[in-house]
Amino acid sequence: MGAEISTQHRSDDGKVNSVHSLSNWNTQFQSSTTSDKLMVIDFSAAWCGPCKFIEPAVHDLAVEFSDVDFVKIDIDELPDVAKDFEVQAMPTFVLVKKGKERERIVGVKTDELHRMIEKHRF
């Protein structure tokens, strides 16, 4: 087994935190409920082609929006979290602020995701 939370770094400062355990997810989500920071949750799966396709763009967004928390959850690793958020298709991006869902985007819609982050980050 590996670490329960891993960070996928690129050659710049952007990072997407991959959460691999329910306890770490609960801790991270709970801390986000008291923060003014926007959290972008990327629900994906290792076998999902569109998820792999959009992954570089998500990393680029993490670089551009360093004031936003980006979290990646594999629905096969944490199916209960996916169920709690009623994820039906991948990729699904859920934008959360202070513990409340602000918006969601389903599919490979990079421009729309960018606009939604801009809209909700402050």
Image (spheres, rainbow, N blue to C red):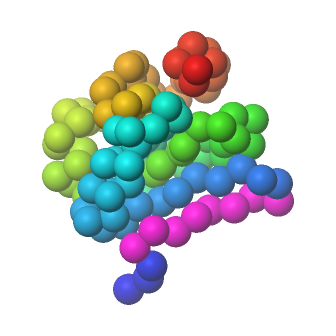
64 or 57, which lies in front? 64
The answer to which quarter of the image holds residue 94 is top left
Where is 41 relative to 78, above or below? above
The residue lying furthest to the front in this view is 34
Q: Is residue 7 magenta?
A: yes
Q: Which residues are magenta?
A: 4-11
In the image, what residue occupies the spot 57% across and 24% down?
121
Residue 116 placed where, x, y %?
A: 54, 17
In the visual, does 81 lie left or right of 94?
Answer: left
24 or 19, which lies in front? 24
Residue 80 placed where, x, y %?
A: 17, 52
The answer to which quarter of the image holds residue 28 is bottom left
Please indicate, yes or no, whether residue 18 appears anywhere in the rendered image: yes
In the visual, does 84 lie left or right of 90?
Answer: left
Q: Quadrant of the N terminus?
A: bottom left
In the image, what residue occupies the spot 31% across and 27% down?
100
Residue 99 placed where, x, y %?
A: 32, 34
In the image, what residue occupies the spot 58% across and 64% down?
7
